[in-house]
Image (cartoon, rainbow, N blue to C red):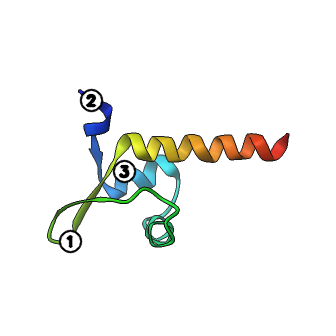
Amino acid sequence: MDSDAVLISIKEAARITSLSRTSINEKRSAGKFPQPVPLGDKRIAFVKSEVDQWIRDRIAARRSEAA
């Protein structure tokens, strides 16, 4: 399966990023987290590969700050 086609819930996004759902929503509103895919009335999901990239970007930023 194409990893760009895998959707995860906000609960799963919170679990893999160690952020709360509230923090994810605040970062989304500020444009600092991947935007969700609407699934229906009040239901969203995130593209897993975009969340994974967001995590890798945080790690890379930490490495560049330490250098």
Q: Which is nearer the N-term, disc 2 or disc 1?
A: 2
- Single out the residue that lies furthest toward the top: 1
> Horizontal placement of 24 versus 37: left or right?
right
**Residue of label 1:** 42
Name the residue at 50% across, 50% down: 17
Label 1, label 3: how far apart the Cα atoms are: 17 Å
* Residue 24 image point, x, y percent: 46, 64
Secondary element under disc 1, as helix, strand or loop, is: loop
Q: Residue furthest right?
A: 67
Between label 1 and label 3, give the one nearer the viewer: 1
Mark 2 sits on what residue? 2
Checking the image for residue 21, the label placed there is none
Q: Amino acid at mark 3?
A: Glu
Q: Disc 1 vs disc 3: Cβ atoms closer than 8 Å?
A: no
Residue 12 numbered mark, or none: 3
**What kind of element bears circle 3?**
helix
Spot occupied by residue 5 in the image (x, y as percentages of width and height):
25, 38
Q: CA distance from mark 2 to mark 1?
A: 26 Å
Q: Nearer the viewer, residue 48 or 20?
A: 48
Residue at 27% x, 39% y is 6
